[in-house]
Amino acid sequence: MLRLQGKIAIITGGAQGLGKAIVKRFVEEGAKVITVDRITPAYGIKNMEAYKLDVTDSEACNIFYNYVMSKYGHIDILVNNAGITQDSLTKKMSNDQWNKVIDVNLTGVFYMTRLIGPQMEVLGKGSIINVASIAGEFGNVGQINYSATKAGIIGMTKTWAKEFAQRGANVRTNAISPGFILTDMVKDVPEEILNKLIDKVTLGRLGCPEEIANTALFLASEDASYITGQIIGVNGGLCL
């Protein structure tokens, strides 16, 4: 049986990387997926609709939400995956670097969930999945902006788990906290640095995007029906 049969799922940042893997996994399990991104996906699959959207634009998010509701009537799953990095040591970080990361990684998540979370509450059910990071749990040198946003997402996750279920609705909110995952971004890291990262991982390797997608599938499905407000670390034993 397909675990997401007939579900309507929105996945932000779905054009590439982790988002792309999540889109494909959800479609395989029967979901109708609307993926949003600032760029058009270079791939196309059945039961996936691509919508060009900047999640930092509040009015554009409103228009998108109204479009989805008018076409599909409801939203069952939201995956807040869109995120960027603008790395620098704190003393060298510009206002622009700070603001861009805050806008996409934190404010964009708020804009999308502010619309879709209450809809799920009225619907009486739903699953919100936020993509956090080990940087949000443990910090990372040169990523004060990124770490702050991912820590903020953890706080949002716990708050929304309480808020959207307070009237008895079966709305679950959880976060995935990836470790070092082999995305295109990581592939550009010099081999010497990459090997140092791998040495820190208990399982001795980088994770695959598909492993994040499988975790998202679990949290979106009824297999996780009694799990909410949790931060699921997918890091190969990096942080024990």
Image (spheres, rainbow, N blue to C red):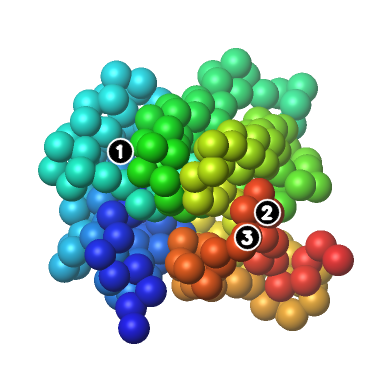
Label placed on residue 60: none
Residue at numbered disc 3? 227
Q: Is residue 100 above or below residue 69?
A: above
Q: Quadrant of residue 99?
A: top right
Residue at image location 50% in from the left, 56% down from the top: 185
Q: Earlier in the sequence, mark 1 or mark 2?
A: 1
Residue at numbered disc 1? 38
As drawn, the residue found furthest toward the right would be: 240
**Viewer-side residue, 205 vs 20:** 20
Q: Quadrant of the C terminus?
A: bottom right
Q: Amino acid at mark 2?
A: Gln
Label 3 packing within 10 angstroms: few (<14), some (14-19), many (20+): few
Residue at numbered disc 2? 230
> Which element type, helix, strand or loop, lies under badge 1?
loop
Label 1 packing within 10 angstroms: few (<14), some (14-19), many (20+): some
Q: Horizontal placement of 239 versus 166: left or right? A: right
Q: Quadrant of the N terminus?
A: bottom left
